[in-house]
Amino acid sequence: MERGAEVAASMAYRMAYRTGDSVKATSYLAAALAALVGSAPGLAAQEVGDDLTLERAVSLARGNNPGYLSQANDSDAAAWQVREAWGGLLPSVSAGAGAAYTEAGVQRIGTLDFGAQSTDYLSSSYNLSVNWALNGSTLYGIANARANARATDAGIEAAAFNLRTTVTAQYTAALAARDAEAVARDTYERAQQNLRIVETRVQTGFAAGTEATQAEVVLGRAEVALVRAERARRASIARLSEQIGVALENDVELVDELDVFEPMWDADQLLETALRAHPSLNSFEARVAASGASLRQAQSSYLPSISLSTGWSGNALEARNQDFILSQAQDRAAASVQRCEQLNALDAGLPGGYPGWEPADCSQAAFTPEMGQAALDANSVFPFDYNRIPVTVRLNVSIPIFQGFTRQRQVEQASAARRDAQNSFRAEELRIRTAVHQAHADLDAAWRSIGIEERNLELANTQLEQARQRYQVGNTSIIELMDAETSLSTAQRDHLNAIYSFHQALVALEAATGQSLRPSTGGVDEDGNGAEGRPDAMLSNG
């Protein structure tokens, strides 16, 4: 949950940076901070409180909805993918060091004898290598990574919009369930009132006892309807809780009241706005761009590649047996004396002497204690007195000619993925066109239905009041009273259904157009302009 708050704060910063709008930036940052506070372990249920507004529900969902957080979590990975692509232009550097001990003895592999090693050795080494490579995939990989990052951000924005739409729809459904419970309770109370009226007439002898029984049956049915309405309200709160990602109490108060207003928008203007700036369509468009970048990267496999490498290294080898070192020094001195004496003899025996040789005192090459100490000092190199190995620089240019159709397959796969992305974009555009016209027609029908149901409700109220008055004075039967009660209950439910059909159709139209259309949220007016003169004000993701 803390991770979700971090993602929300990161996305708020990105949105503020891209828009440059101080008002939006403030709202995004406030939403992220609210998500951060709401994500503290053990505090989520307490932070909701007794009252819940729609904006608070959306804010909590941004910080706690698992589905949204799973998608928003991809933002950091996409950003690091871009950094990795830029890092591909830099050389790779590796360093290493090591030490080894070799015991004296005979080294054999199978039946092969590599001779005896007469002393133990200590060895150490170091290496530092630098490698740099450049190819088409590296160059085009930067554009591909950036396109993927933009597609990821667009997908997160679309997910945030869809989350807001879903929460709004469920919040509206919870309001409808709450008001349906109120209607059921009102029907139950009227049934109680009717029962009292009937019982009074039965007690005074003006009505048969069966009429009281019939009124009790109606009361029982109203009570059952009330129980079902209470259960439906609790279920709607549970579903809202699921969307928000935070546990809500059954008695939480939904304080936002949704206003009904006459929709004056033109469907073509709404469609134009949706096709220009719908978050979902933007996400599909970003995917098309990303697939195009992937195709160009795949095609770059036909380009040559260049690599450059160099390195620094050294080693040290020290014999552990000093007698072995002194023996070797003595052998080298004896060999020098012997060679000197041989050359002196040749020089004396050849007429004119040995070419290039001057007779020398061979005793000067004989072994001395100083020579032995110098050999011991030269042997004392472990672990850091390295012998440096000369540097080697390699430059390689590779031109790919044939790789068994691997490149062709990769290019074709990338091309097919791009065509798939274009088809998905087209399908989403067609879906939005259909959804806008359908939701606009549904909203208009819902608005006209509200007016009709309001008249029906007024007539049903009048009918019940008249039936009660006539029944009390004995001018009508219990059947007419019950029919009037049924008509009023039906009119109340139909009126409530018409109102919330309007709100659900409005939510569907907002989802289809990708913008807020409610006057209180700064949506578009009948001329296609947003609040405060801003054209086509978009639905806030915060």
Image (cartoon, rainbow, N blue to C red):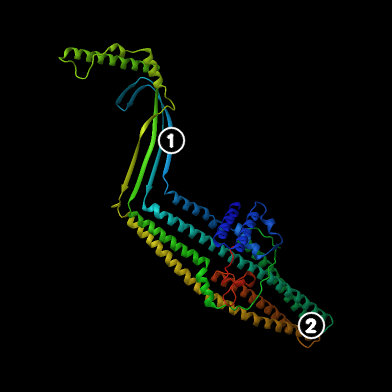
Give yes or no for contact between labels 1 and 2 (Cβ–Cβ under 8 Å): no
Q: Amino acid at mark 1?
A: Gly
Front position in the image: 533 or 169: 533
Q: Residue furthest bottom?
A: 475
Q: Which residue is at 76% across, 74% downward?
A: 189
Disc 1 vs disc 2: which is toward the camera? 1
Q: Height in image: 473 above or below 316?
A: below
Compared across the picture, whether 291 is left or right of 224 comes to left
Front position in the image: 72 or 206: 72
Front position in the image: 531 or 284: 531
Q: Height in image: 471 above or below 38?
A: below
Q: Which mark is residue 96?
A: 1
Q: Amino acid at mark 2?
A: Ala
Position in image of residue 177 (x %, y %): 66, 69
Position in image of residue 58 (x %, y %): 62, 62
Q: Which residue is at 37% across, 61% downward?
A: 415
| Residue 208 falls in image quadrant | bottom right
